[in-house]
Image (spheres, grey):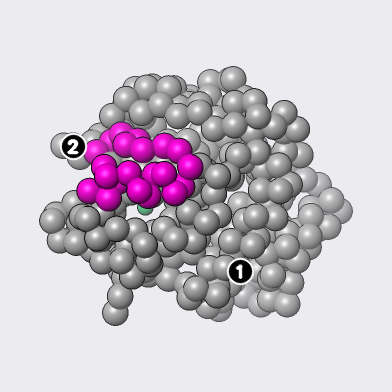
Amino acid sequence: MPSSSSGATLLELDGITKSFGRVVVADDLSLGVSAGDLVGIVGPNGAGKTSVFSIISGDLSPDSGQVRLGGEVVTGLDAAARCRRGIGRTYQVPRPFGAMTVFENVLVAAQQGARMHRRASYAWASAVLDLTGLATEANGLAGNLGLLQRKRLELARALATRPQLLLLDEVAGGLTDPEVAQLAEIVAIVSADGIAIIWIEHVVRALASSVRRLLCLAGGKFIADGPPAAVLADPAVREVFLGTGVRSQAGDAAAAAGLAVEGLRVDDAADNGTWPA
Ligand SMILES: Nc1ncnc2c1ncn2[C@@H]1O[C@H](COP(=O)(O)OP(=O)(O)O)[C@@H](O)[C@H]1O
Ligand SMILES: [Mg+2]
């Protein structure tokens, strides 16, 4: 069950530093996220958003600094142990077991991640499939799903682990506006249930209208943190999006593509799906 101590600090990053060679993805980064909060992160391609998620989830070790969950240091725990402590995440490129059914994928997450036993895990997997709009796909092979359904399954697998903190990495990437709205609706329901959510998204407009607090990561630092409208109006944030603003998905994609052209990063362009054709 999610923590009921809404308002208490659930996640703390304390002085996190991480580089890959000369690329600094986190430069003495600190962050506190309250239980039940709904927080968005934007930032140019290659800024290190996914890496920060990996440091929180245990897929990546920081060079220095601490990750705490509910006041306990989890920096030394592996991803599986952190998952059992209540950190659930999605991956930018969905990672389903393609040869298993949609239901089996979610069942594995419930049994491994949430340590649920057979009967409870079946009921929970069904509930999660209902919530994520995948009930009619339950018996199909995960490998046969289209993009929207793969994104839904990625969300379903993370939810099935019963997180208190859910990390969403570009779950809306590549989807149409109505599809993004459908996903945002699911996120709102999950949030209303008291699960803390940190949501990274390239579709800035959808993110800004969904979250209560928005951060912008650039140069290894959070250069802005506050209500979405204030963050998007911040000159420093506009600057990293090359002055094109963050008013529309197309504008954002162009801005991010522009940054990639400047050499920050181009290798995400093909897989995050928000790039114009
Ligand atoms: N495992 C890794 N090894 C080396 N470099 C990496 C690794 N993961 C990410 N990077 C680099 O770190 C930078 C940040 O990547 P990433 O966290 O994926 O950014 P974002 O999610 O903001 O686009 C990029 O330059 C990327 O190439
Ligand atoms: Mg990323």
The residue tagged 2 is: 21
Report if the CB atoms under discs 2 and 1 are less than 8 Å apart.
no
138 and 194: which is toward the camera:
194
Q: Is the residue indicated by label 2 positioned so its CB lies within 8 Å of ligand 1?
A: yes
Tell me if 204 is positioned left or right of 98 in this view.
left
Position in image of residue 79 (x %, y %)? 52, 38
Q: Secondary structure at mark 1?
A: helix
Tell me if 157 is positioned left or right of 93 in this view.
right
Position in image of residue 258 (x %, y %)? 19, 61
At x 37% / y 49%, what residue is drawn?
A: 232
Q: Nearer the viewer, mark 2 or mark 1?
A: 1
**Magenta span:** 219-240
At x 33% / y 70%, what residue is drawn?
A: 250
The residue tagged 1 is: 182
Tell me if 30 is positioned left or right of 196 in this view.
left
Q: Alpha carbon of mark 2 to alpha carbon of mark 1: how far? A: 39 Å
The quadrant of the image that shows the C terminus is bottom left
36 and 237: which is toward the camera:
237
Position in image of residue 274 (x %, y %)? 36, 68
192 and 65: which is toward the camera:
192
Q: Secondary structure at mark 2?
A: loop
Q: Is residue 186 visible?
A: yes
Q: Earlier in the sequence, mark 2 or mark 1?
A: 2
Q: Is residue 167 visible?
A: no
Mark 1: amino acid? Gln
Q: Which mark is residue 26?
A: none
Neighbour tally class for label 1: few under 14, some 14-19, many 20 plus, Cα within 10 Å: some
Question: In the rendered image, which quarter is residue 88 located in?
Answer: top right
The image shows residue 69, relative to residue 223, as above or below, that is above
At x 32% / y 44%, what residue is drawn?
A: 234
Position in image of residue 11 (x %, y %)? 55, 30
The quadrant of the image that shows the N terminus is top right
